[in-house]
Image: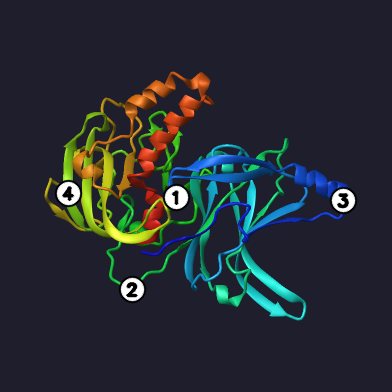
Amino acid sequence: MTKPLYVLNHEDENYVIQYHVTDGAKLEFLKSQWKRFKCYDPALSQTYEVLCRPTNPNLEVTVDRYLPPGAPAGPYRVEIFVPAKFSTSKRVIFTITYKVNYNDSGVQEEYNYAMVDMSELSDVWHPLGEFYLDPSLGREIGKVRQYDLSIEDPPALAAYGPVRWVPLFSPPSKVSRFDAPVGSQEERNAPFPTGRLMFGKYPIWVGQWYDANPFLSWYTYGYHTGADLNLPGGTEADRGKEIYSIGDGVVTFAGRAGSWGNLIVISHPEAKVTLPNGDRRKQAVFSRYGHVDNRIFVRVGQRVKRGQPIGSIGLAANAVSGSHLHFDICYTDLLAKRPAHWPNLDVIRALRWQASQTESRSYLIARMKIKQEVINNYLDPFLFLRENH
């Protein structure tokens, strides 16, 4: 198991604030704009003190988080923690330094840009990208810089929270490949994801298949445990399309399951898993396929291969439209015991009656408990497939 490296708060020596002004009065004004607040990370069960400030039409403040000393060379996924509070900016700019060049004029950094819509995120770790980093080349390697610059009118709020570097290297061993549960064979064999967006917002997984309701989205039924995969072209564009097992495994459930309609669950003996706290290991996982039509091609106890057709896309129970595939990944044995599990549905229904009290303490605590249950059992299926494809 490889553990991530963290810069958790502004008191860390690897957390550096820089002001790009010369006027003394302006400098004091910029310093006065910082606000501090506490937020809870359900993935690590930890509370942080986080800084936030308004966005700025002029570049006047940057915050650097440096990769902690002693990190080995190798591939890393760089992630930021975005709190639910005081994160309303839709255009927060980051750069991640992955290479440095030394010449007569000094150090020149090569970096990637990332732009994050913080308003869409809530108490989650969000990836900025994956990079090969060799810290022996200089302290700047792996540096994450966040900018106050954003053309938003009126100014929005941006949080300057924790950063972590998740190592993606481990001792070499053969691990089964996993593919998307939809698309043609050629599309499923292609690189995952495609790198394209549907409607300028939703990542396209394979072909034209996109996720209309990503992991941990808050919607009618609470925090989403996985992905809702759709094709463009209307609510019935994907009805009847074949569903495929994402990897080798054994069917543990196949049949009717209440409001799900038909459901299939498959146990996979080993996959690369990044736990919510950033630790990585190889372990068994369960894949779940919801809203399958009556054409189920597998039975309980049957061994299946990666890419084997297991059913077709249908509807939730009692629905007359809105065909799609609900797909999620469980890293505990929860789905072996409760294949139709959905987190705290009774509590979610009660919360819907409190819509006018969305900022009350009881409401926020209840929502946090629901999110905790999802995080304690499910993985982001998009990141899982990207890591295992």
Q: In this view, does 345 lie to the left or right of 284?
A: right
Mark closer to the chain start, 1 or 4: 1
Mark 4 vs mark 3, foreground winner is 3
Mark 4 vs mark 2, foreground winner is 2
| 47 w.r.t. 268: above or below | above
Mark closer to the chain start, 4 or 2: 2
| 388 w.r.t. 258: above or below | below
**How far from the left and from the top, in percent, is residue 16?**
67, 58
Give the residue type at disc 4. Answer: Val
Mark 2 vs mark 1, foreground winner is 2
Q: Mark 3 falls on what kind of element? A: helix
Cα–Cα gap, marks 4 and 3: 68 Å
Mark closer to the chain start, 4 or 3: 3
Q: Using a 10 Å C-alpha cutoff, classify the residue at mark 2 as few (fewer than 14 neighbours), some (14 to 19) or many (20 or more).
A: few
Task: Report which residue position mark 4 lands on.
Answer: 251
Mark closer to the chain start, 3 or 1: 3
Q: Using a 10 Å C-alpha cutoff, classify the residue at mark 1 as few (fewer than 14 neighbours), some (14 to 19) or many (20 or more).
A: many
Mark closer to the chain start, 2 or 1: 2
**Snapshot quadrant of residue 146:** bottom right
